[in-house]
Image (tube, grey):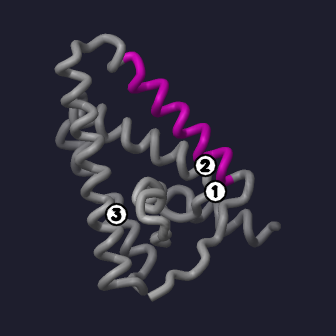
Amino acid sequence: MSTPIPVKTLPIGRIFRFCLGIFFASEVWPVYRDVALEGIIIRLGWAIGLMLFYLGLHFFILRFTPKINSVLGAILAFGPFLSVFILGYGGPAATGALTFLAVSLLLAAMRADSGCEVMSIPAVLSGRHTHLACLLFSPIDWCERKLH
């Protein structure tokens, strides 16, 4: 089964993703600088856990529901990230979630991935793109494509 060629993000969407990724990276960097090695490992463990979850979701969508409604998919994809962030607010889980999001946003900006940025790392690892809408960036991408 082949996946359709993903639509690339245009410059405005890439710039927004990059700027937000830099912002989140600048927010988590001081935390990593100020905690002990154990704290770094715990926070990176949360980030890696999210990456593994999204990798599993990526393969599930490609295998079983390739034609999932993109908005429903965006809600399903962003829900776990948001849950980890809210439940771990101010702690290692929140820092790990923001680390994962920062890396995903920067990767999505560099690769010009459209859609849900949390699926950028799984797309790199699998070589296939899962096009789910992003609640924040997809409207920007749609408007930019209309104006282009």
Most frequent secondary structure within the magenta stretch: helix
Tell me what residue is drawn at x 36 percent, y 38 percent: 98
The residue singled out by tag 3 in the image is 77
Q: Amino acid at mark 1?
A: Ala
Residue 111 appears left or right of 73: right
Q: Position of residue 101 (x, y in %)?
A: 41, 44
Quarter of the image for the N terminus: give it.
bottom left
Between marks 1 and 3 in the image, the one whose residue lies nearer the viewer: 1
Range of the magenta residues?
13-30
**Percent x, y for residue 78?**
35, 58
Badge 2 or badge 3: first in the primary sequence: 3
For the view shown, which residue lies furthest in the right direction? 148
Q: Which mark is residue 112?
A: 1
How many marks do you count on the picture? 3
Q: Nearer the viewer, mark 2 or mark 3?
A: 2
Q: Residue at x 32, y 71 (%)?
A: 59
C-alpha gap between disc 2 and disc 1: 5 Å
- Dot 2 corresponds to which residue? 109
Q: Relative to residue 9, is residue 86 depicted above or below?
A: above
| Residue 37 forms part of the magenta stretch | no
Mark 3 residue type: Ala
Q: Secondary structure at mark 3?
A: helix
Q: Is residue 41 left or right of residue 99?
A: left
Label 1 to label 3: alpha-carbon separation: 19 Å
68 lies left or right of 79:
right
| Residue 14 part of the magenta-drawn span | yes
Q: Name the residue located 46 percent from the left edge and 62 percent from the top edge.
A: 123
